[in-house]
Each structure stands twice: as structure tokens, then as C-alpha cells.
Amino acid sequence: MKKNTFLWIAILLSLAVSSCEESLIKEEFENTPVDNYNAFWLEFDRFYGAFEAKNINWDSLKTVYSGNLTDSSTDMELFTAMSGLLNELNDGHADLLAPGVGFFRSWNRRNKSFFADNKSTDNSGIVMMQNIIRSNYLKNKYKAGDYSGWKFFYGTITYETHRVGYICIPTFGNDDYPNDFIQQAVDSFNTLDAVIIDLRFNGGGKTEAFVTSLNSFSSERKLYMKSKFRNGSGQSDFTQLDDHYTNPHPDCLKNKPVVILMNSFSASSSDHFILGMKSQSNVITVGDTTCGAFSSVLERILPNGWKFRLGAQVIYGPDGKLLTDANGNYLEGVGIAPDIYIQDQFSAIRKGKDLPLEVALRNLEERIH
């Protein structure tokens, strides 16, 4: 078969800078199942960052999933082999899109439903939850803005004898991210007793967006993370560690009790925002464990046109040790555990109650002086 030259498009979304770095890499592979598989495996071998952090033997896995592949294999057989490789990673930023065949996400909780007691992944439940918050908790007194189809809103919840600011940040991904709108919320919250930041179902987005909001809601300059990137052919080849700080500005939220609501669909930039806010002495997290999609992303196109993503970044705590959960598992794909665990319940929403929000309000009532 005639060899065709194709472009591998790399988009590096580095958390150390505010813009994307694009690079084009030329390789020659035949557009056959075997060559597509080898190209897929090779790009992970060259650039994926977390092999050592996750204790993954990538060399041995290559043969495990390619054993039955030939140049006569079907697209589905190739897709299944590549999906098998991805499944070994359990990575929120590793996925494969094969038009007309399927989409596979490495994240091992990919089949999790939005609500613990309802297997649906229909967005109508999320819409219902947000309507309940606006009507039953904010009493329909709130400010809202529609930005690229995403509704941001904030207001005041009166609970017992205190006033609690509430804001829903549904995404960090829109081009017209509402920094001014969020700063207006922060300004209003500075006259209240406590604050709830709702990041449930916020799948992440742009680095600039979460960093700006992080610096608005944090009140202490803290080193909250270190990170490094693959920069060589060896799986131990990395850049030097970069430091990541919260940098509150003069008009930031002043020190008062804060709860962040989160769940398994709080991902990527939400993971980073939550990690940064957890460095603050006034912050408690409530809800379910986050997605755990921390690494910046490289995007690739195979010779057959299929697209996939991988992460080149590895994250560490302020002490320079890998960020892990209580069991020693690296956080990529595992996520950040909440301080107070409670899942979203659709049955409660149908009755007009938001259980994680109720828990957050009770927690804040105990912490307000």
C-alpha cells in the first residue's frame, strides 16, 4: 500500500502559561490497522507522562492488545484493541474518537450516572436541580448571565440566622468566560457570612478561566501544586518541576467559611480549581470524588483520521511528592475525595431538595463565628 504522509497535530494546554502552544509533527505510516495501532501506541510511548506514576508497563501492553490484529482487521477490531490500551490507563484526559465506529474514554468511571439513584445521563436532571436551587434556595432572587449557552448564576441563601452566598459555575470552557460577572458575585459575597461555590457537572475548560476565578475566591497565597512534563523519549525524561500558586488579588473574597460542591463530573480545570482552593484554610469540600483529569492535553490524528488525546503532565503536591489518594493511588483518573462525602440524589431533587447543598449549609452554619 502506498505510504501517505499525515500531520499529527499537537496542542499543548500548559497550565504554566495562559495560551495554547501548537506544534506539527510529521510521521510516515501506512493507513493499515497494524500501522494505525503502532502509531497510536508509539505516541503514548513518546509523550504520555504518568506511566511511572501509575506503574504501567506500556511495552508489555502493546502485544497484549495487538496479538490478533492484521492488515485485514476491521475498524471495530482496531478500535477494540486501542480501547483496551486506553482502559489500562484510567485517565480522564485519554480518549479515542473513531467517527462512525465509536468513542472511548479511558476514565474507568465513564459509565457513572449523573445521580446515585438514577442511571440516566440525561441533562434534564441537572436542569431540574439548578431550577430547584434558584426557586427553593435562592427564592428566585438571583443574578444570571448566559455565556455561550452556559447559565452562570449567583444569589443569597438565608439559612437559620445567616446569609450565605451561592454561585453556580457550570464551565470554565466558554470563550466569553464571565470574569466580570464572577467578580460582581465576589464583591457581593464579601458582605455575607459564608460562600458556596457549586462546581458540580463542571467539566473544565480553559486555564485562564479557572486561574482567574481561583485568584478571586482564594484569600491566601499558597503553593498548592507542582508539575512537570515529558520532554524526551524515556519514560523518566521530564522538565524541571514548576510551582503553582494561588495569587489572590486585592478584590478577592475576604477570609470567610467556604464550601465547594463537587462530584465525579467536576473535571480538568475544575480539578485544578478545587485543588487550589483546598490549600486555603477556610475551605471545605462537599459531594463526591472529582473526575481526576489533571494533565494538560496533547491531541493527535491517526493516518485513518481517528483522533485521540493524551496527557504529558504529572502533578505533585507542595512537598514534591506525587499527588495520591489515601490508598497511595496517583490522582489522575482517581480524583480528589471530598471532605464530606454525599452523592447527588435525583429522588431528593424531585422532592425539591438538594442534599449536598443542605449538607453544605449545615456545615457553614457550624463554622460561622
Image (tube, helix red, strand yellow):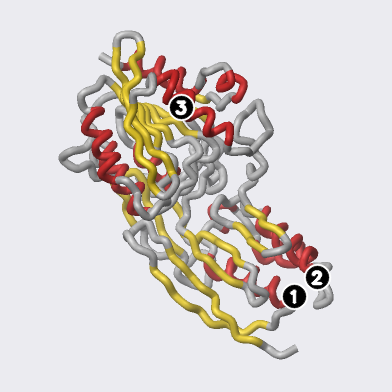
Upstream in sequence: badge 3 or badge 2: 2
Residue at the spot of label 1: 34
Kindly identify the amino acid type of the residue bearing the numbered disc 3.
Answer: Val
| Picture quarter with the N terminus | bottom right
Residue at the spot of label 2: 69
Left or right of 298, for residue 179? left
Kindly identify the amino acid type of the residue bearing the numbered disc 1.
Answer: Val
The reply to whether callout 1 and callout 2 are in contact (CB within 8 Å) is yes
Residue at the spot of label 3: 286
Identify the residue at image location x=37%, y=34%: 153
Asked if 234 appears above or below 206 in the picture, the reply is below
Indicate the secondary structure of the residue bearing disc 1. Answer: helix
In the rendered image, which quarter is residue 319 located in? Answer: top left
Q: How many numbered marks does the figure carry?
A: 3
Indicate the secondary structure of the residue bearing disc 3. Answer: strand
Asked if 291 appears above or below 89 in the picture, the reply is above
Q: Residue furthest bottom?
A: 2
Identify the residue at image location x=55%, y=70%: 46
In the rendered image, which quarter is residue 307 located in? Answer: bottom right
Q: CA distance from mark 1 to mark 2?
A: 6 Å
In the rendered image, which quarter is residue 188 located in? Answer: top left
